[in-house]
Image (cartoon, rainbow, N blue to C red):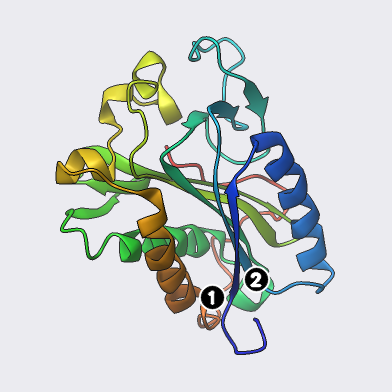
Amino acid sequence: MSPDGRPAHRDWGFREYASALAEMRELRAARRRGEIPDTLLLVEHPPVVTVGVQGSAGETLPPGLPVVAVERGGRSTYHGPGQLVGYAIVDLAPRGRDVRRFVGDLEEVVLGSLAGTGIPAGRVPGRRGVWVHGERKIASVGVAVEEWVSFHGFALNVSTDLGVFRSFRPCGFPGEVMTSVERETGRPADLRDFQAPVVRAWEAVFGAPPPVPPPTDRLSAATPVLPAP
């Protein structure tokens, strides 16, 4: 927690993926050493495809874009302009080391940020991420956990170029399932308008550790987990 009791956040603006990934890894280690509080990193990336640990080396990916293999759970996805990405650096030990609950809490942050848009967003049993009418995916969630500290996080499509998703199978789904705030509202949407709602939802959800759950169905801290399938 920050001195005022709230989890911290940082605005990284528009930043190359490789640079952000390197610093995110450093901050995960810093959180493990107790040098920083739980922190949400907000960033927008230039076009890039990332491939998680469930990705296949032979899958078709969008042509002409850089591809980065990462340690998060899940398959391939696209990051680009108009997408608000949130990397959550969180010590899970005080939160009961419950990774599934943590991923659900990240989904709750996205849902909270969309509350004022009128978009009927929610969850779909058996599928990670945030969905509209249970059919169109507006945000993806994929994390990794090392030494019980999380990194990676969520990606909310605000005004993202959805055409890129149609050139491959993001998270293993047909690209046509991907949607955005702009598409769902039928109005222009500015990524910057969603930063404050995301931060408010982050502070509301992660402002206090949840009750420690029973010691069941926990996952190893050494394994990347829970993609947004």
- Is the residue 45 above or below the residue 151 in the image? above
Element assignment for label 2 = loop
The quadrant in which the C terminus is found is top left
Q: Residues within 10 Å of mark 1 (few under 14, many from 20)?
A: few
Horizontal and vertical percent for residue 169? 40, 21
Q: Residues within 10 Å of mark 2 (few under 14, many from 20)?
A: many
Horizontal and vertical percent for residue 12? 61, 53
User: Taking 100 as reference, is 35 left or right?
Assistant: right
Q: Nearer the viewer, residue 122 or 2?
A: 2
**Residue at image location 62% in from the left, 20% down from the top:** 66
The residue most toward the right is 33
**Residue at image location 46% in from the left, 36% down from the top:** 81
Return the disc, 1 or 2, that comes first in the chain's sequence: 2
| Quarter of image, res 19 | top right
The alpha-carbon separation of the residues under discs 1 and 2 comes to: 23 Å
- Is the residue 54 above or below the residue 190 in the image? above
Q: Amino acid at mark 1?
A: Pro
Of tags 1 and 2, the one toward the viewer is 2
Horizontal and vertical percent for residue 80? 48, 33
Residue 22 visible at all: yes
The residue where tag 1 is placed is 214
The residue where tag 2 is placed is 38
Looking at the rendered structure, which numbered label has been put on residue 7? none
Horizontal and vertical percent for residue 204? 43, 78
| Quarter of image, res 179 | top left
Q: Amino acid at mark 2?
A: Asp
Element assignment for label 1 = loop
User: Taking 75 as reference, is 20 left or right?
Assistant: right
The quadrant in which the N terminus is found is bottom right
Q: Nearer the viewer, residue 180 or 208?
A: 180
**Residue at image location 34% in from the left, 49% down from the top:** 190
- Is the residue 221 above or below the residue 49 in the image? below
